[in-house]
Structure formats: C-alpha cells, structure tokens
Image (spheres, rainbow, N blue to C red):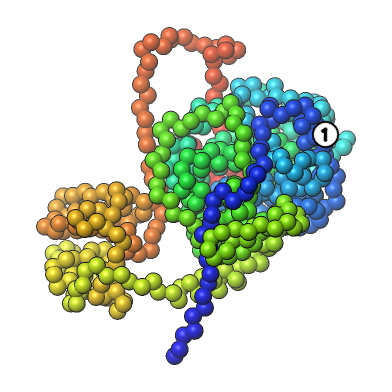
C-alpha cells in the first residue's frame, strides 16, 4: 500500500514583532482626564446592543463578555487554560473599549495594583462616585448606588443559564458588598515569581491550580464581598472592577515571563476534563490548542509583544523582585501552523521562514472562537493525524549491528513479565536502559543522538541518581515523572532525554525557606491601626469553592 504524505508547514513563533506596543497603566498613574475617558468608554460599551458573538470585539457589548465568560467559566478556571484564556479576554475587551471611540487606540486598558495598597485598597478613587462607585451600599440587595454602573443606569447581563444564582430582590442591579478587609500584599505575592516553569507558576499540586486559592481568588472575593457579582466566578465581568483586577492578574503572569526568554514559550498542564470543547481528546493542555471562547491558539497568547498581541505594562509600586529569581532554561521556540491573525487593525502573517509581514485591515479576528464547541476541532485532529505519520529520521551514534533485547530477569531483577524488555544491549557491550526498541526496526540498530557529550557526561543537569537498598541505581528525571533502574555494577555513560517515551508531567517541589530571625529588629506587638501593623488577607469563602465544584478541603 502506498502512503501519500501531506506536508504541514510550520513557522517559528518570532518574539517582539509589534513595533509600538500599547502600555497598560496602573490606575493611580493615570491623569484625571484618562480616568474619566476610561469610565465613559466602559459606560458606552455597557449600552451597546448585544451581538451574541465573541469573535469581533468591534461589535461586542459588555453583556457579550459577561455571557461568554459565564458560559465557559468551568473550562477557564482551575486548569492550565486560566492565564491564556483571560489574557485573550482582556485583549478582546481592550479592543472593544477602543472601538467605542472614547479610548485612544495607542493606549492599553488600566489595571489596579491593589497589592501595593493591600491594607487600604478601598481608599482608591476607583470606588468614588465619579468613577465606578462605592465598595458597598445600604441597599438591601447590595446594589451599587453610585458611579457609572449604579442601579439607575446599568443592568447586569441576562442570566439564561442561571449561573448568577439571583432569584429574589433586585435581579437587574450590579451587586457589590465589600468590606474593609486586607488583600494579599506585594511581598507575599513576590515569592511566586521564583517559579522555574509555567507548571511551577500555576500549579500548587497535581491538577490543583493556584488561581482557585491565590491572589486571583482573594481579589474576587475581597473586592466584591459576599453575594456580589464580582465574587461569582461565572458572572464577575458584570462588575467593571473585574477588568482592573484581571489587568493585575495578567501583569503578574507577564512579570514572571519577563524574567527569562523561554518563559514566553512555556506552557503545559491539564485542562478541566478531556471533553473540553478545545481539547484533542485528552485533558492534556498544549500551546497548539485553541482557548475556549476566543479566536486564538494558546501559542499566540504567550508573548504580549509578538505577532498577535501588542501591549506591555507600566511599572507600579507592587513590582517587587522575586526573592530567588529562577535560572533561565534554554530557549526552545514554539512551532505554530502558518496563519494570519487580525486584531486591532493589523494583520500579522507568519511565513515559513519565521518572518512576519503586516498590512492594515479591519478590527476583527480571523480565527474562529469556541463557544461551547470547537469549530476547528476537526482540523486539529487531521493535523495531529498527519503529524503522527511523520517519522523523524534516527541519527546514529553507536553502530551496533547486533542489538539484543535484555529482560529484567537477565539483569538479575524481578519482573512479573519475563518477556518485558527494559533495556537493549549492543555488540560493544553498551546497555541502553529504559527503552523498548524491540518493535521498531528503524531504531533497533541505532541509538538516538541527543547531543550527549562524548566524555560520558549527562546531556544536562536534568536528572538525579540515587542508590536504593539493593544497590540499584535509580535515575530520576527532574522535569518528567519518569525513573529508570540501572544495576549497580553498570556505569552510567549517558542519560538521554529524547528517548523517555511518553513524557508525563512532573510537579516540581517548591523550595522551602526557613525563617531567620533578625536579632536587630525590635519586638513589638502592634495592634490594628498602627502603621507597622499588617493585616492578613482572608481566604476565599467555602461558597466560592463549592460554586465552582472545587475541593475546599484541598485548598485548606
């Protein structure tokens, strides 16, 4: 049977392709005129008729954003997609605000760095009557009574799915019921910047993500208060504070990415479930999958100054450096399908040579969004099918012509399956552990060349070797959940990284630091109100977790 191979052209993601990035400013850095302009643009967007779609920010309304987020909230939280999903959402919102004509096209939307004023965030003029209204009111339904989104001038988005859970009282007003409670301070947040990978940055444990419990969740619960729209994980975009808060959330990810060039390509983890509309049939997240709701692949969203996005952030008072900055890994650029994406008046087209050409066009997005079902799922499946047909040519290093399967029994180890191949050996006596080549004729007579040094050292410092009680050497990969047992009488010449097989995610432990008391520091017991007293922020309420089907006990 003849096999006709289809070629799938890929182009490298080339960093820094936007010439004039918009700068997103911290709210407190803005002039009075800019604050008024942003409030007016938000109010205008809130009055725009609903379009019922999420691909063209130029025609989307405020309610469109709320409904889209509500319908996809389950897929967008508590998994790897959280950061890219909300980055895409912020970008679409920014373009929608610009499309009102009340906000300049060369400026990004503002963010609220509440980490720099965690003890008195409520004193910000964000919550003044001339902007977005007070943190609470005496209304029996906690309706916002002043500002641009007061009950007299704004109605929340329709809640056909019932995610808002409001069935009594005033069901149309924006609800806000915050108290004067502390938020996480910049010092406590800075330690997260020590993360050595995207997994380390986003996950608190296997399939347990920080966004469910960290500053993101605390911001929603504290800024909104009990029974508020902001504290509801589904309909929180009803409140304009959502956008100022998520501007900080996105900036925090951006700050981590700025530490190492590779971090702009780093993305891994799991989706909520394998039936996520954007999945490829498993719950494994990857940069070549779309994000739910929005017309982008994850790979397009990792660099804010790439060929799709074009913005950066101002410095603000909460920008404390990582206590122990990560060492930067080698840069491994992503490979994405050749495509063009049109957002905010610029079409950026990646070519097979990795260059980018730009032409003016309209404010729309060419890719199809996913609103409950992926419109590109079949294309992705076909693409993956083609790629699976491609066999990478095996480069040889050891020219052994007689490779004999070695079973665990022949090596003196116990095995429930005596025919299980755990290693291969060549005619020059080199034994390759941890790989089964017995079914691959193309690889039987060769060993893959992954550029190990000829002096027998390891490929990189990406593994550890421990000896157990029986004398067996256990090779443990530090970046993958994979170990290889090697008999004690064998010398380890090379540790290969390209022959691990199916790589599984490995959750790197967070380094523990012991507190060292400063003997020169005075010891006082400060009370509330003293300038040196630091209040501890409250953990999100149990109701927040149960509303998102999260495990409250795990968060504790």
The residue positioned 32% from the left and 71% from the top of the image is: 394
Residue 164 is at least partly visible in this image: no
The percent position of residue 17, horizontal first and vertical second, equals: 59, 51
* Residue under the image location 62 percent in, 34 percent down: 314
Farthest residue in the bottom direction? 1
The quarter of the displayed image where residue 415 is located: bottom left
Q: Residue furthest right?
A: 152
The x, y position of residue 121, in whole percent, is: 65, 25
For this orientation, the residue located farthest to the left is 489
- Packing grade of label 1 (10 A; few <14, some 14-19, many >=20) is many
Q: Quadrant of residue 336?
A: bottom right
The residue wearing badge 1 is 148
Rendered position, 174 above or below 404: above
**Residue at left offset 57%, top offset 28%:** 318
Residue 366 is left or right of residue 467, and the answer is right
Q: Position of residue 163 (x, y in %)?
A: 71, 49
Residue 486 is situated, as x and y percent measured from the top left of the image, at 19, 58
Q: Residue at x 27, y 70 (%)?
A: 396
Numbered disc 1: secondary structure: loop
């Amino acid at each position: 049977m003849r096999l006709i191979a289809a070629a799938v052209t890929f182009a490298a993601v080339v960093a820094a392709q936007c010439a004039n990035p918009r700068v997103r400013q911290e709210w407190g850095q803005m002039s009075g005129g800019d604050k008024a302009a942003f409030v007016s643009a938000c109010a205008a967007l809130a009055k725009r008729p609903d379009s019922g779609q999420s691909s063209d920010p130029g025609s989307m309304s405020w309610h469109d954003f709320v409904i889209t987020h509500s319908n996809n909230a389950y897929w967008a939280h508590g998994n790897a997609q959280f950061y890219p999903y909300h980055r895409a959402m912020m970008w679409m919102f920014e373009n929608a605000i610009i499309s009102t004509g009340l906000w300049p096209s060369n400026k990004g939307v503002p963010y609220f760095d509440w980490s720099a004023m965690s003890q008195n965030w409520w004193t910000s003029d964000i919550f003044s009557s001339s902007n977005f209204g007070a943190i609470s009111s005496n209304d029996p339904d906690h309706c916002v009574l002043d500002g641009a989104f007061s009950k007299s001038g704004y109605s929340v988005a329709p809640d056909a799915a019932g995610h808002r859970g409001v069935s009594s009282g005033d069901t149309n007003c924006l609800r806000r019921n915050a108290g004067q409670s502390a938020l996480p301070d910049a010092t406590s947040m800075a330690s997260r910047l020590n993360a050595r990978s995207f997994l380390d940055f986003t996950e608190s444990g296997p399939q347990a993500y920080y966004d469910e419990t960290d500053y993101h969740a605390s911001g929603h619960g504290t800024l909104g208060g009990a029974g508020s729209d902001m504290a509801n994980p589904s309909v929180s975009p009803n409140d304009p504070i959502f956008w100022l808060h998520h501007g900080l959330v996105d900036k925090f990810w951006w700050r981590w990415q700025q530490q190492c060039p590779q971090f702009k390509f780093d993305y891994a983890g799991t989706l909520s479930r394998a039936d996520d509309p954007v999945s490829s049939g498993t719950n494994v997240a990857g940069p070549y999958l779309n994000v739910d709701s929005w017309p982008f692949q994850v790979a397009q969203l990792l660099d804010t100054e790439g060929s799709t996005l074009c913005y950066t952030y101002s410095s603000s008072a909460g920008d404390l450096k990582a206590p122990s900055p990560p060492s930067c890994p080698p840069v491994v650029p992503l490979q994405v399908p050749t495509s063009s994406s049109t957002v905010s008046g610029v079409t950026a087209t990646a070519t097979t040579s990795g260059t980018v050409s730009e032409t003016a066009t309209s404010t729309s997005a060419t890719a199809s969004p996913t609103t409950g079902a992926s419109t590109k799922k079949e294309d992705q499946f076909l693409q993956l099918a083609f790629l699976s047909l491609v066999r990478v040519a095996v480069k040889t290093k050891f020219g052994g012509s007689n490779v004999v399967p070695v079973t665990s029994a022949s090596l003196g180890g116990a095995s429930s399956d005596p025919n299980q191949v755990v290693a291969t050996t060549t005619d020059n006596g080199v034994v390759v552990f941890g790989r089964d080549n017995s079914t691959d004729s193309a690889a039987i007579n060769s060993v893959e060349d992954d550029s190990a040094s000829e002096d027998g050292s390891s490929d990189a410092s990406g593994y550890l070797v421990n000896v157990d009680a029986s004398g067996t050497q256990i090779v443990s990969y530090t970046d993958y959940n994979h170990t290889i047992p090697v008999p004690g009488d064998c010398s380890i010449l090379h540790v290969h990284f390209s022959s691990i097989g199916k790589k599984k995610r490995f959750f790197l432990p967070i380094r523990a630091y012991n507190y060292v008391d400063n003997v020169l520091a005075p010891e006082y017991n400060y009370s509330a109100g003293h300038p040196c007293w630091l209040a501890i922020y409250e953990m999100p309420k149990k109701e927040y977790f149960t509303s998102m089907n999260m495990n409250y006990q795990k968060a504790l």
